[in-house]
Image (cartoon, rainbow, N blue to C red):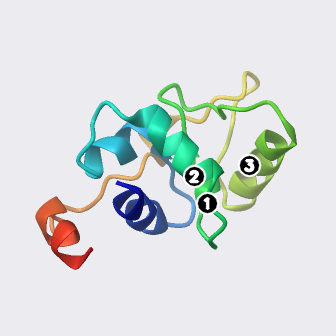
């Protein structure tokens, strides 16, 4: 699962976000959103981890990494409202239909 999660997160474009649940589903494990969070938290690779939010469009941590995540996303043009929510209707990444999961799995 880890390789698939990292591969999908690496594809999230600049200025777009995905949810933990979305990445879990794309990786073939639709009920593993928390596992996606653990994978990203323990990953030391150069990966756009900041582009993954919770299902409400919010940062999942309030630590310094949460503040960093907001700053990084705002630098990409992602806007958060006063409650710290990103409008997923505007910023949610929708992988193109040509990005078929079976093709991704074959490449792993």
Question: Pointer 1: residues within 10 angstroms few (<14), some, or many (20+)?
Answer: few
| Residue receiving disc 1 | 43
The answer to whether the residue labelled 2 contacts the one labelled 1, judged by CB atoms less than 8 Å apart, is yes
Rendering coords of residue 35 (x, y %): 46, 39
Please tell me which residue lies in front, 98 or 80. Answer: 98
Give the secondary structure at mark 2.
helix
Q: Quadrant of the N terminus?
A: bottom left
Q: Earlier in the sequence, mark 2 or mark 3?
A: 2
Please tell me which residue lies in front, 61 or 29. Answer: 29
Residue 62 location, quadrant: top right
| Residue receiving disc 2 | 40
The answer to whether the residue labelled 2 contacts the one labelled 3, judged by CB atoms less than 8 Å apart, is no
Please tell me which residue lies in front, 90 or 33. Answer: 33
Task: Check the image and report above or below for 78 versus 35.
Answer: below
Q: Nearer the viewer, mark 2 or mark 3?
A: 2
Give the secondary structure at mark 3.
helix
Q: Earlier in the sequence, mark 1 or mark 3?
A: 1
Q: Nearer the viewer, mark 1 or mark 3?
A: 1
| Residue receiving disc 3 | 69
Determine the residue positioned at 83% across, 42% down: 67
């Amino acid at each position: 699962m880890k390789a698939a999660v990292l591969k999908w997160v690496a594809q999230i474009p600049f200025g777009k976000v995905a949810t933990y649940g979305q990445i879990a589903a794309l990786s073939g494990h639709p009920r593993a959103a928390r596992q996606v969070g653990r994978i990203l938290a323990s990953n030391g690779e150069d990966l756009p981890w900041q582009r993954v939010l919770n299902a409400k469009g919010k940062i999942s941590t309030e630590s310094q990494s949460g503040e960093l995540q907001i700053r990084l996303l705002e630098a990409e043009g992602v806007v958060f409202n006063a409650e710290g929510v990103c409008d997923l209707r505007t910023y949610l990444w929708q992988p193109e239909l040509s990005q078929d999961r079976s093709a991704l799995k074959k490449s792993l």
